[in-house]
Image: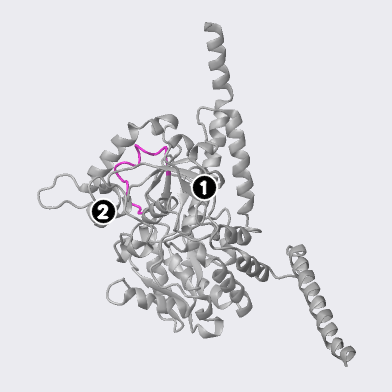
Amino acid sequence: MVEKGLLPSRFLFYLVTISMFLLILSSVFLLEFRNTSIIPTSVFKLFLVNSSSADIKPNVRSEQTTLPLIPSGNTQINSERSMRSGRLGCQVTNSSREIYSFGKQRNIVCDASQALLRVFMYDLPPEFHFGLVGWKGKVNQTWPNVDNPSRIPSYPGGLNLQHSIEYWLTLDLLSSNTPNVVRPCTVIRVKNSSLADVIFVPFFSSLSYNRHSKLHLKEKVSLNQILQENLVKFLKGQEEWKRLGGKDHLIIAHHPNSMLDARSKLGSAMFVLADFGRYPGDIANLGKDIIAPYRHLVRTIPNRESAPFHKRPILAYFQGAIYRKDGGIIRQELFYLLKDEKDIHFTFGSIRANGIKSAGQGMSSSKFCLNIAGDTPSSNRLFDAIASHCVPVIISDQIELPFEDVLDYSEFCLFVRGSDAVKKGYVLKLLRGIKQDKWTRMWEKLREIAHHFEYQYPSKPGDAVDMIWEEVSRKISSIRFKLHRNNRYSRSQFRLQNDSSS
């Protein structure tokens, strides 16, 4: 009887032992082959997230331990800095952006020595930034508290929003020093300008133009002009500006009429713009400046709600101002060519009443959305189309596009020269000739890249804010390259003169 009772016990012992061995073996297998195609990346990420501890606090180093960019030329320090930037630059290539973004999402506090870009921001009085949105802090308080996203000062709505880029970038810099705001570690704000790659000028120039460029009552000079004059005077007196003549300064001037009085005086700085339509080439150009997307006004269509080819009954959609000056004559000609086509929606529209909601519904029900040059080469309509997953048809010969050094727009947009667009039947033949499979490939690409054009707080990996900072990093690297080349002989001659005089 005893012998018979022992058999089940031994059997259970062996069974448990074998089960534990298989469990350990499978875990080792998972870790060993995480980089192969056998284990899906999404599964491995889930395993890592579930295995990490939410109570672990990141190690935050002091600014004194970071590697500064020394404009006057400490070659050893700058060399080390370039190596660090180079390693991070490799991490954000298209082939590894997904994994890099996943890693950034897990950070709670950014380490300044590991950030792609370090930015010094002037503590300008609130009248230059959040004071323009109606924020009033306590006495001597320069910045609002940004640790709670639901309580940050709101930006005015309507058309103001499309040029609100300075608002989002400023919020992102402020939150980079706020431990409980989870955001990418692409950029971090430093309090010592000698440690910075870029000097940020927090002036809400687009809002200043939209709200304060007209004269009121007995005013002889607008508030917008006064703010620009004061800004120029301030910047020209700063050691940071004098150091490189403003070449490492970043100024947001997204509205085409913003900074109109000051742009020529501050033209050595990097501008963040919507396009170059109202700028002379010596003041703004792709060599030093950045094209940023408008903030779209229509609702973002989630991928699960995005209608495929056969559920979009409208072939092409345009709703907006038809009669425009400058390059906008093409809109008028296209209107007369397309207005009577049954599957084309081409009509006047504005944001009044239900305009934005109507435009969003129309775009999300259309296969193609026409983006035609108006007063300037660019318009918010392109980014409304992207948010609606409506394949953009860009008819604007002088347009410059955001992030085009890393995004191939031909994969999700059609481009038509203005001279071709006004030919009778040309646009219709082009659009009707695109079959479902080609359109679907472009639609799928739109759904993949649409998040790059989203402004939000807190920012997220690969969104518009993150992409702009990465673009700034690439520009500052180019500027640094030119400065170093210019120093080849000037420094040698300076040393020679010093040696001779001694």
What is the residue that sits farthest to the bottom in this orientation?
A: 1
What residue did someone put label 1 on? 60
Residue 108 x, y percent position in the rendering: 50, 57
Under circle 1, the secondary element is loop
Q: Which residues are magenta?
A: 255-270
Instruction: Please name the amino acid that badge 2 sits on.
Output: Leu
Q: Could you tell me which quadrant the N terminus lies in?
A: bottom right
What is the residue that sits farthest to the right in this orientation?
A: 3
The stretch drawn in magenta includes residue 267: yes
Q: Between 164 and 135, which is closer to the camera in this rendering? A: 135
What residue did someone put label 2 on? 132
Residue 448: image quadrant is bottom right
Residue 375 visible (yes or no): no
Q: Is residue 259 left or right of residue 25?
A: left
Residue 440 lies, with reference to residue 173, above or below; the image says below
Q: Is the residue marked by circle 1 packed among few (<14), some (14-19), or many (20+) residues within 10 Å?
A: few
Q: Is residue 1 left or right of residue 302?
A: right
Residue 357 lies, with reference to residue 473, above or below; the image says below
Residue 200 x, y percent position in the rendering: 40, 44
Q: Between 396 and 440, which is closer to the camera in this rendering? A: 440
Instruction: Please name the amino acid that badge 1 sits on.
Output: Val
What color scheme is it? Answer: one colour
Q: How many marks?
A: 2
Q: Between 44 and 70, which is closer to the camera in this rendering? A: 44
Q: Is residue 328 left or right of residue 217?
A: right
Residue 163 lies, with reference to residue 413, above or below; the image says above
Labelled pair 1, 2 in contact (Cβ < 8 Å): no
Task: Please give the name of the residue rendered at 33% of the width and 47% of the height, measured from the top-left corner.
Answer: 203
